[in-house]
Image: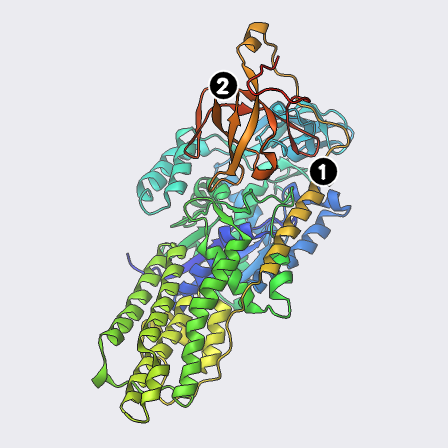
Amino acid sequence: MSTPKRYLITAALPYANGQKHIGHLAGAYLPADIYVRYVKAQKRDAVFVCGSDEHGTAIPIQATKEGTTAQAIIDKYHPLMEQNFKDLGIAFDVYHRTSDPLHHQTAQEFFTKLEANGDLETKETEQYFDESAQTFLADRYIKGTCPSCGYDSAYGDQCEKCGKSLSPEELINPVSTLSGNAPIKKTTKHWYLPLNRHEDFLREWILEEHANDWRPSVVGQCKSWIDGGLQPRAVTRDLDWGVKVPLKDADGKVLYVWFDAPIGYISATKQWALNTGGDWKPYWEDKDTKLVHFIGKDNIVFHCIIFPVMLKLHGNILPQDVPANEFMNLEGDKMSTSRNWKLDMQDYITDFVNKENGGPQMADALRYYLTQIAPETKDSEFMWKGFQDAINSELVSVYGNFINRSLVLMHKLCGGKVPPYHAAIEDSEDIAVKEAIANTAKKVGELIEAYRFREALFEVIALARIGNGYMQKKEPWIVAKQVAENPAAQQQIDNCLHLCLQLTANLAILAQPFLPFTAKKICHLLKVVDKILDWENAGSLKLLSVGYTLRAPELLFRKIEDEEIAAQIQKLNDAAQIKKMETTPTTSTIAPVKPEIVFDDFAKIDLRVGTIVAASKVEKADKLLQLSVDLGFETRTIVSGIAQHFEPESIVGKQVTVVVNLAPRKMRGIESNGMILMAEDANGKLHFVNASDNINPGSGVS
């Protein structure tokens, strides 16, 4: 495939309604930055755009929570997010915002063109309306009882207790969050994008043209949407916050945020052109431009189905790839802002980057670990212990250790200058290192081109390991003891350290997309300009001139101490607990009674008293315990999801109530023969349902 004339790289616009966590960073922004840094190191024309998504109901809802205005919210979080990205090395060419007049103008012109060309259609529908507030209600402005779990404060789009996706019509006893009154249904007119007209185009473009070069998860999700039949989707809504619909008969209506937000990529490119004196049009209109969207999997439908239809109708180019990532969990649970189970970028910056023993290299430490565990093909897990191990055992002990030793030995054994290379005494180990450098440069480039950043980073660290192994075999510190009697031994030292220093320079080039701050620091130590980081130099063995004096070594990374990790885990748990206490209703929320059964149904259940005689955690399952339960007539293995509530040793000897005639079920490869009855209190804590007196195992419960 030929190299495109130019690249336009986008990263999903983050909502300006609060701080963003590392799951967001790992999902879209870090992989995009790695790719852009590589493309630019190749001296290719590339523009990297992003910006704050400042419309939609999330903004005014957050304003209500904080007792302020929507404008104040976006003015608060836009600069904070922009600075967070800079602090963590995300190098956008422009970080724009959708509240900017340039974006409003761009989005309105986009809508107007589609409307004028007959690419939109209008419909009248009934929607919820608050008579007191005299406004139509978006999904998030409606609350009611969840039909699934009975939670009485579920939103019109989702129940935050059970997680079920909802529509306002499904809520029991819906009320307006603005007035507290029950809304009425009222007819309103809206404009729709008829996606159903474009199924054939999407099927050919995605399922045929890109079936083999896009990630299977992306193609699979698109196929599911297309096969399910696409429906017209509203592009306007009744709100007073957003881009006004530029039509005379659309008073009080704005562009739906899903429609205006991706147009933000275009307005951001226009702003970049204004900032630099460039021309934005080729990046959106020239087919020799490679457009790549970096997103999380929850944005696939917008970037692969809806926005491409919009772009096609508007006469723009289509994305050549949409490398969507899966989700990143945190310490055994899904990241959640509403539950405070998260690690915000700002918190990491405060605790590690801005600390006295922090600095830019600690930003690279986070970039390293997030890339190592990137959710490229499946959901991944951020563990503080894993972060510590990755930094200490790889960045410090492998990558940093090799570079530090090379510089230390060069100063000690070669007078602080790059030694010459004596080809006449070159051996097989020298040749193997040369080949490893060349091969790694080729592999890393190919893997980054294919968006396989985890594997690319692995190759970089593997090269540092090769360097360490080579140095250990050559043992220049031992050979140095022979120089007095055998001056020729100095040539062996020269060759070893010459190659180690050339390898060090290559490690800076190859790591630059992943560890930009570290790459610049290595350049400083080697006394070379940053231009050496151009990718054309990767694999070269002539990066450092013989006789050139280098700076004294400095440690690139520091070790992460156990106390720091313990403090972070405690901080996470404390924040989540405080949030839980804040959001726990003062009145008990009791699930509705299940459908009525007859006595014969109940009689089928065999409940017995059992005694737990052994308990242990199930490997690689944070929530499961494997129990051995004495039932009097036999001892059974039962797997129970109570590991986060009880330590195994604390429940041995406990009497429990067991459903003994439940069909066996395999959990994590272990056959579970029964179920322990548990009760959950108002704080979410589990308790055993057991007899008050000591009862013989096997006794019936009735």
- Quadrant hosting residue 82: bottom right
Asked if residue 91 can be seen in this view, the reply is: no
- Quadrant hosting residue 346: bottom right
Residue 612 higher or lower than 497, as above or below = above
> Where does residue 640 sit, x and y in percent of width and height?
53, 31
- Quadrant hosting residue 420: bottom left
Q: Which mark is residue 233?
A: none
Specify whether 63 is left or right of 511.
Answer: right
Residue bearing mark 2: 633
Which mark lies nearer to you, 2 or 1? Answer: 2
> Where does residue 96 sit, x and y in percent of width and height?
58, 57
Residue bearing mark 1: 583
Q: How busy is the neighbourhood of tag 2: few (under 14 within 10 Å), some, or many (20 plus)?
A: few
At 56% from the left and 23% from the top, the residue drawn is 610
Specify whether 475 is left or right of 160.
Answer: left
Residue 515 higher or lower than 482, as above or below = above
**Which residue type does callout 1 highlight?**
Thr
